[in-house]
Image: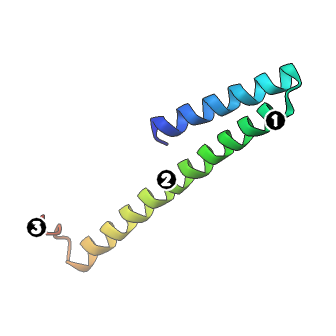
Amino acid sequence: MTMKHKIQQAVGSAREKAGAATGNRRLEVSGRAQRRSAQVRSTATDVRRRATRVVREAQVKLRGGRAADPS
């Protein structure tokens, strides 16, 4: 999870709680949407990083344990 996603989740959570405390349904819903959007983006980033790692490991195995050329 990147710092940007953590911040967006915190802001969304704060907006959601502020909306609930004040009875402002629109603020509560927009905060929930912001928090969940950040969660989805964070998960997508994690999946992308893991998939990249798996592909690189497979490439190394196919090359017989040699790392790829940096060029």
Mark number for residue 54? none
Q: Quadrant of residue 12?
A: top right
At label 3, the amino acid type is: Ser
Judged from the image, the secondary structure of the residue bearing numbered disc 1 is helix
SS at badge 2 = helix
Residue 1 picture location, percent across and down = 49, 42
Position of 49 relative to 8 (above/below):
below
Instruction: Using the image, tell me which numbered label, if any, was put on residue 46.
Output: 2
Q: How many marks?
A: 3
Quarter of the image for the C terminus: give it: bottom left
Q: How is the image coloured?
A: rainbow
Q: Which numbered disc, 1 or 2, marks the residue closer to the eye? A: 1
Q: Is residue 5 left or right of residue 37?
A: left
Coordinates of residue 50 in the picture (x, y in percent): 44, 59
* Label 1 sits on residue: 26
Tell me residue 43's x, y (percent): 56, 52
Considering every residue shown, the one lying at the far top of the view is 22
**What residue lies at 32% left-to-right and 67% top-to-bottom?**
57
Answer whether labels 3 and 2 touch (C-beta < 8 Å): no
What's under tag 2, amino acid-wise? Asp
Question: Going from the N terminus, do you reach mark 1 or mark 2 first?
Answer: 1
| Residue at image coords 16%, 70% | 66
Alpha carbons under labels 3 and 1: distance apart: 52 Å
- Which residue corresponds to the image point at 36% horizontal and 61% vertical from the top-left? 53
Amino acid, disc 1: Arg
- In the rendered image, residue 61, in percent from the top left (x then y), is placed at 27, 74
**Residue plotted at (77% across, 25% down):** 17
Query: Of the residues tagged 3 and 1, which is closer to the observer?
Result: 1
Crowding near the residue tagged with mark 2, few <14, some 14–19, many ≥20 C-alpha atoms within 10 Å: some
Considering every residue shown, the one lying at the far bottom of the view is 62
The residue beneath circle 3 is 71
Q: Secondary structure at mark 3?
A: loop
